[in-house]
Amino acid sequence: MKRLYVAAYHQSKFGKLMDMGVPAIVRQAVEGACGEIGAEPAAVDVGSIGAVCNASLNEQGLLAGLVAMVPGLEGKPIEAVENACASGGQAILSVVQKLLLGEGEVGIAVGYEKMRGPDGKMDGKLIGKVLGYFSHPDEREGKVFVFPHLFAEVMDGYMKTHGVTEEDLARIAVLEYANANKNPYAQMRKVAVSLEQATTIEGVNRYIVEGLPLKTYDCSQISDGYAALILATEEGLAKLGVKKSDTVELAGYGQATDPLRKEGRDVLRPAGALKAMAAAYDRAGVSAADVGVAEVHDCFSVMGALGAEVLGKAGYGQGARYWAEGKAAVDGECGINTSGGLIAKGHPIGATGIAMVGWSAWQLLGKVPEELQVKKPGVAATFNIGGPICASVCTVLKPAS
């Protein structure tokens, strides 16, 4: 197979895009990524775009047509993908497949979400309802906010099975907020959270579901934002005029989907996620021991713990301890979610999987803020999920050789 390289990455600040409409978001994402390397959009051969709330909140479909409206991209193979919160990762894999099929040498993956109104405000109840569409119908009844409820159950199960406390999981969020404070792109970059704040029920911190342990600071953000990634073969890099030394290799990837219904599955040992991560490692010819920096899908704090286990950095049931012992810190064994993660960087759903890969590429290239830079990252890995740990997309990045 041809080797593929991350030639460019571009993103907005996560949080609020105010009155920017979807066509402008898509165009700015594409042109921003191309501008990072001084390329014209016409240099792109293929593309893919991922989003989740485009129809329900933005009243917009056929997103591929909006990508094709960017001058130079008309008439090219472009598609829109939807894989719930793994839509961004799926968009990357869509581009990978097109390039490996020989449909071109340069491809762009775009992801975005517009979840807030033109004034920056949100309708939390409506957002909870429309995100609930990405769960099984039988698991929605009686749940006002479906996904917080489902993951509160996962959190409760993780704590009871492994003897983990609410404080253990709160430490994940506290570290991520500290990272986000140093990330200029993060939604919560101006919000500091102490362990006491994350564990005390007062102010904004409250239990989300009665009788279950999930609290406000355990949750990811409702975010606007976009991200775009340009992938290229070696021929594509030459076409773009980009030096291989200025890129990183997308060396491995894996994708797997478990049944949508959470009930009846062992979500503490998510089979699809483990399979996808193993496939990514196998394609890249590396193991978990080689990974020095990673981004995982912490839609809720328990997923930070489970993410460390899926990566293979922590054993079964040891993910929370991995964070508590400082091993996931920037100067730890493997810096996990140095961006701030979904909890503090933000979670513009369609952009999330792309942002994971983009930030990881920046880590390998030494382009993140100094305080967040892992000194010897070696190999990077990402783990992006959709639904109740249902759809999984994993990638492995290496320095270009």
Image: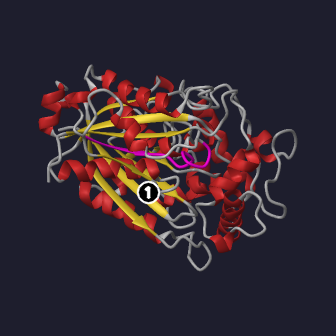
Residue 180 spot, x, y in % from top left? 59, 32
> Is residue 148 shown in magenta?
no
Report the quarter where the C terminus lies: top left
Residue kind at label 1, given as amino acid type: Leu
Say if 135 sits above or below 394 in the image.
below
Q: In this view of the protein, can residue 332 be seen by the observer? A: no
| Element class at badge 1 | helix
Q: Which residue is mark 1?
A: 311
Name the residue nearer the viewer: 330 or 95.
95
On the image, which quarter does residue 177 sit in?
top right
Residue at horizontal 57 percent and vertical 30 percent from the top? 186
Name the residue nearer the viewer: 389 or 109.
109
View extreme (bottom): residue: 264
Q: Which residues are magenta?
A: 46-57
72 vs 164, left or right, is left
Residue at horizontal 74 percent and vertical 70 percent from the top? 141
Say if 231 sits above or below 387 in the image.
above
